[in-house]
Amino acid sequence: MPYDLKEVAAISGMPGLYRLVRPTRAGVIVETLDERATRSVASARNKVSLLHEISIYTQDYDQTVPLAEVFDRIRQHYGEDFALTNKSDDRDLTSFMETIIPDYDRQRVYMSDIKKLVTWYRLVSTALPYDAAPETAAPEAEETAVEAQPTQEEAPAKAPKAAKSEDTVETAEAKPKARAKKKAE
């Protein structure tokens, strides 16, 4: 995914989003995603939710859309100029959500979730780099790997390992016979 959300978390009782720095005995050291990058400790009693584990419900109960994919859809649809905020009109936010995920579950995704999604996207889009290169580079790398492998016709014929071991056995047996023959002469 274009945004790397593995180290980004939302912490209960603490506003905003945080980058996980390292664990401690009492919790985890976190850093805010804003321009100040203030470090603090989130205690073990705070609930830490990693963004790459969060998904949006859809009409199909067995399927959800990961948050990284939702952020990618927002970036593709709106580009750099994303004007919505969590203070926008509810109708605008609902329309936005229908545009991004047409089949989102309207019963399980609340307006507060949509507002949180907008706020998180604004934070992530300003703090993290958008990297679209891995998606286009991966197929090229696969093609290169496929081209580098010789086909069966191009590959030299290899003797089976069993044949090599038999040759070695025969050679090993032949040497004592040859030595015995030399001694007899």
Image: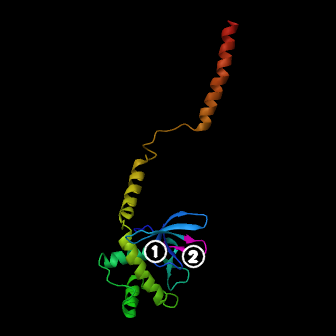
Residue under circle 1?
A: 17
Around disc 1, counting alpha carbons within 10 Å, would you say few (fewer than 14), some (14 to 19), or many (20 or more)? many
Magenta-drawn segment: 42-51
Image coordinates of residue 134 in percent, x first then y, are 39, 62
Q: Is residue 42 above or below residue 147?
A: below
Image coordinates of residue 35 in percent, x first then y, are 37, 70
Tell me which amino acid carries mark 2: Lys
Q: Is residue 65 above or below residue 141?
A: below
Q: Quadrant of the C terminus?
A: top right
Q: Is residue 177 above or below residue 122?
A: above
Tell me which amino acid carries mark 1: Leu
The CA span between labels 2 and 1 is 13 Å
Q: Is residue 103 visible?
A: no
Q: Nearer the viewer, residue 165 or 112?
A: 112
Residue under circle 2?
A: 47
Name which quarter of the figure residue 131 lies in. bottom left
Number of dots carrying numbers: 2
